[in-house]
Image (cartoon, grey):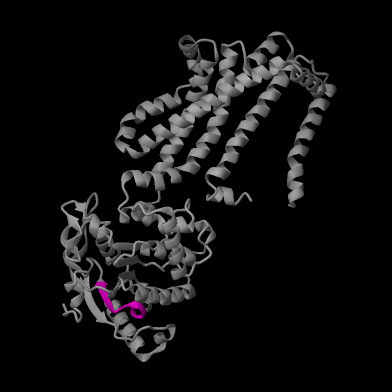
Amino acid sequence: MTGKMKWLITPGVLVGLVVLWEAYVVAFNVSPFILPPPGEVWDSLVILLGEPKTYWNMWVTLFETVAGFVIAVILGVFFGGVFGKVRVLEQALNPLIVGLQVMPKVALIPLFIVWFGFGMTSKVVLAAVIAFFPIMTNTILGIKSVDPGHRDVMKCLNAGAWATFRNVELPNALPYILTGMEVGIVLATIGAIVGEYLGGSQGLGYMAVATLNAFDVKAMFAVILILTVLGLVLYFLVVFLRRFVTPWHESVANRK
Amino acid sequence: MEVMSDAAGSATGDGIVLSGIEQLFRTKDQEVLALTEIDLTISAGEFLVLLGPSGCGKTTLLRIIAGLQQPTNGSVEVGGNSLWRNASRNDAVMAELGVVFQEANLFPWMTIEDNIALPLKLRGVGKSERRKRARELCEMVGITGFEKRWPRELSGGMRQRAAIARALSCRPKILLMDEPFGALDAMTRDQMNSELQRIWMDSGCTVILVTHSIREAVFLADRVLLLSPRPGRMDTIRDIPIARPRDIYVQSMAEFQEIETELRRRLDTFGETTDEGSGS
């Protein structure tokens, strides 16, 4: 397939979906309370984007997501590094880690609201908790999966534990950490939004609930659209980060 | 054991003395004796090749000399200093060694230059000094111009050249090589053998190289130590009196072929793994 064709497929599919949507609504005479036609959603979106309140809510959700994500990255890489290096600690705490990982974090929202209030803090905490685990487990995996040959080289060079960590284990873990971050940023966005759904008075998640309560379904669709774009931008920022952090990795080389 | 002709090497304290080396591997339900009764003196500047079929413990022996494996019994002395003191390695002895593995084992996240200079970095050598030395080494092993590349951008042969450069970066007195060209095609391999000979002659270091190719062994070695399998023990020590520098064409000389045949016959008496000896 030629390069130009490739870039036409995605927009083509998108346009096709919108056309199908419109056709479906018209053909089956669907109530706008169930599925508003794309044209009306677009009009709502334009109206929403004209209101300063929308930008404030966007900023709130963005802040909660990014703050939670950054905390998750720092703690996830730190604890992943510690557990990856100190096997005994990992084995001892493994049941606890798995238990926490399996626990549905969303169920903690009421607790977080009691602890941290209805403001942004409870959402930041939820986003961080939800994004933490994939980053931590990937860091552990990355540190453990150092090639035995690479370890031999460091042994022959009399390298100490810190030098081995800095020169070998950490860089070896970077592609894994980035994969964890790709999952983590999506989860952090979900965490922030669900937090807003369930207890809050600001943010895009709250906006979605507010539009629903006002029976303004087309505005709700518009909010979902904004959320999707926000999530996409954040995700691709992390993907883009890969190029800068691991330019040596095959996953980057093949993407030229 | 034959008496060494240039005992001066060990007298100046640069030789390697292996005495009574024995290696036992314990698995869950059995014990395997990998090496036994290894007594050998390697003099400074010598090119020794460890030859043998798979399972003869030649790699284990090299790993013992490299300090990667502590032998069950026996001692390794380098320049009069013991490599192992109880359960800890003697770092001063380790600093005299450079090791090249079958895989280049370059770190993919470092440029060729940084890979080569890593041993210097670990010793606290400054950046500009490291750059300079890496350039010299690249020239020495013939990969000038690739200093800033990632390892994945280099061919297998070039990666192995870089690995040799890395092993040489701290000017080791002893270079240990575990089937360094085993993964390369025959043509590249011949070329690398010639270049290794040149590098060895230029640097004056002691080389211990493991291979299962008889031809490679005869081409490179001052002495070939043939190990017999299960358990690995010293079978034959063969001097290779062919003049240096040797070029590829010495392989067609009668003397070369005689030695090669002699070693092959000896290898064949070990049974089963004879095909391992064919020098690709």
Residue found at the far bottom of this picture: B254
Q: Quadrant of residue B98?
A: bottom left
How many marks the image carries: the answer is: 0
Quarter of the picture containing the N terminus of chain B is: bottom left
- The percent position of residue B156, horizontal first and vertical second, equals 48, 64
Residue found at the far right of this picture: A26
Residue B219 drawn in magenta: yes
Check the image and report above or below for B275 versus A196: below
Q: Residue at x 32, y 74 (%)?
A: B204
Residue B214 visible within the image? no
Check the image and report above or below for A38 versus B80: above
Residue B228 visible within the image? yes
B148 and B58: which one is in front? B148
Residue A14 drawn in magenta: no
Q: Residue at x 55, y 48 (%)?
A: A247
Q: Quadrant of residue B211?
A: bottom left
Check the image and report above or below for B11 versus B251: above
Where does the magenta region start and end?
B217-227
Q: Is residue A40 left or right of residue A221?
A: right
- The percent position of residue B160, horizontal first and vertical second, equals 44, 65
Q: Residue at x 53, y 58 (%)?
A: B149
Quarter of the picture containing the C terminus of chain B is: bottom left
- The percent position of residue B246, horizontal first and vertical second, equals 38, 83
B25 and B126: which one is in front? B126
- The percent position of residue A115, horizontal first and vertical second, equals 45, 11
Q: Residue at x 57, y 18 (%)?
A: A194
